[in-house]
């Protein structure tokens, strides 16, 4: 073996080792997180998937996730310490020791989960009780809805490791698309195109690209028959101009990558049933929520990546 071959072999081995190490660290962290969720669930009677969903939500809204921590939950100091004049929601602070050391630490994962669990339990342990507790904690409807939906996904699949993705159309279909995000649109007033158009024939199946919950289904003057799916990363996936919906797909359903949700059409730009004003295509949009507001971002790079992954399977 010459020197060049040895160097290439060394680089290859190093890359494999690094990939193995990354996967090992990720798996270990996930295992530690699950252990914490389930431990707290056992002592608070709050199902583990709610703690997992709260943690998952906060992972997406913080620009500076805490270092040397397993969870990403960052309690509000008002919630933790209370105030001089107690309120009905945070009477005297909910911070408490959850790891047995009798020290109340706002940066300790066990203390945080224990305190949050006790707070939620003070409202009760039913789904409605938990929803009310979350609203009083976050004071935002979309946040509560996102956490409840994510909990639903975690409960169904019994894991927080849900990284798979899929391309929204079958690869064998005759389709084409370009990066059309940000292009000017005139119908309905001056605005930009908030998605990527994937042109295909009428009736081509449209699939969920992600794990999530169907948040919206119905008619929109611009989008025609459309479906919206919220995933576990606070991202809303919007499928528009559908020819129709898959039988049995309803708001509140949990979906996974590859599940058929409808078919390609040309509906929209008019009252319900309007169709054929443009060639059949799927409008696919993505919207990120950061806990304060939601905005559109370019789905094209993600579609290209998911298409490539689908071809490699």
Image (cartoon, helix red, strand yellow):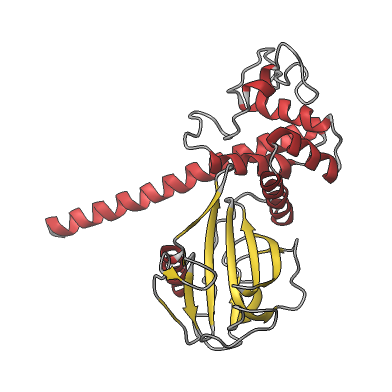
Q: How many marks?
A: 0
Q: Residue at x 65, y 69 (%)?
A: 227
Q: Quadrant of residue 219?
A: bottom right
Q: Is residue 40 left or right of residue 9?
A: right
Question: Can you say whether 50 is above or below 313 in the image?
Answer: above
Residue 209 percent coordinates (x, y): 56, 66
Q: Residue at x 68, y 36 (%)?
A: 138
Which quadrant is home to the N terminus?
Answer: bottom left
Most extreme residue toward the left is 3
Residue 145 percent coordinates (x, y): 71, 49
Q: Residue at x 47, y 34 (%)?
A: 64
Most extreme residue toward the front is 189
Residue 101 percent coordinates (x, y): 67, 14
Q: Is residue 69 left or right of residue 133?
A: left
Q: Residue at x 54, y 88 (%)?
A: 201
Residue placed most toward the observer, 96 or 294: 294
Q: Is residue 167 left or right of residue 308?
A: right
Residue 247 percent coordinates (x, y): 75, 78
Question: Can you say whether 137 is above or below 18 in the image?
Answer: above
Residue placed most toward the observer, 293 or 76: 293
Question: Can you say whether 28 is above or below 164 in the image?
Answer: above
Residue placed most toward the observer, 38 or 221: 221
Q: Quadrant of residue 243?
A: bottom right
Residue placed most toward the observer, 278 or 136: 278
């Amino acid at each position: 073996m010459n020197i060049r071959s040895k160097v290439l072999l060394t680089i290859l081995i190093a890359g494999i080792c690094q990939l193995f190490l990354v996967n090992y660290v990720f798996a270990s962290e996930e295992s530690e997180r699950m252990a914490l969720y389930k431990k707290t669930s056992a002592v608070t009677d709050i199902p583990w998937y709610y703690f997992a969903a709260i943690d998952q939500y906060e992972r997406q809204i913080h620009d500076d996730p805490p270092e040397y921590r397993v969870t990403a939950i960052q309690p509000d100091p008002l919630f933790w310490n209370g105030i001089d004049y107690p309120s009905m929601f945070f009477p005297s602070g909910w911070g408490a020791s959850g790891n047995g050391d009798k020290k109340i630490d706002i940066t300790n994962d066990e203390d945080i989960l224990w305190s949050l669990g006790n707070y939620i339990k003070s409202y009760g342990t039913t789904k409605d009780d938990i929803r009310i507790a979350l609203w009083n904690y976050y004071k935002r409807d979309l946040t509560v809805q996102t956490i409840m939906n994510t909990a639903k996904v975690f409960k169904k699949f019994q894991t927080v490791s849900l990284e798979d993705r899929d391309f929204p159309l079958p690869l064998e279909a005759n389709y084409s698309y370009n990066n059309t995000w940000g292009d000017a649109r005139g119908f309905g007033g001056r605005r930009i195109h908030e998605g990527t158009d994937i042109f295909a024939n009428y009736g081509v199946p449209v699939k969920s690209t992600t794990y999530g919950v169907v948040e919206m289904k119905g008619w929109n003057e611009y989008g025609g028959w459309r479906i919206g799916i919220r995933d576990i990363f606070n991202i809303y996936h919007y499928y528009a101009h559908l020819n129709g919906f898959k039988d049995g797909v309803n708001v509140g359903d949990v979906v996974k990558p590859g599940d058929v949700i409808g078919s390609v059409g040309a509906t929209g730009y008019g009252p319900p049933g309007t169709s054929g004003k443009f060639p059949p295509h799927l409008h696919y949009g993505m919207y990120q929520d950061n806990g304060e507001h939601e905005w559109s971002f370019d789905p094209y790079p993600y579609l290209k990546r998911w298409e490539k992954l689908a071809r490699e399977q």
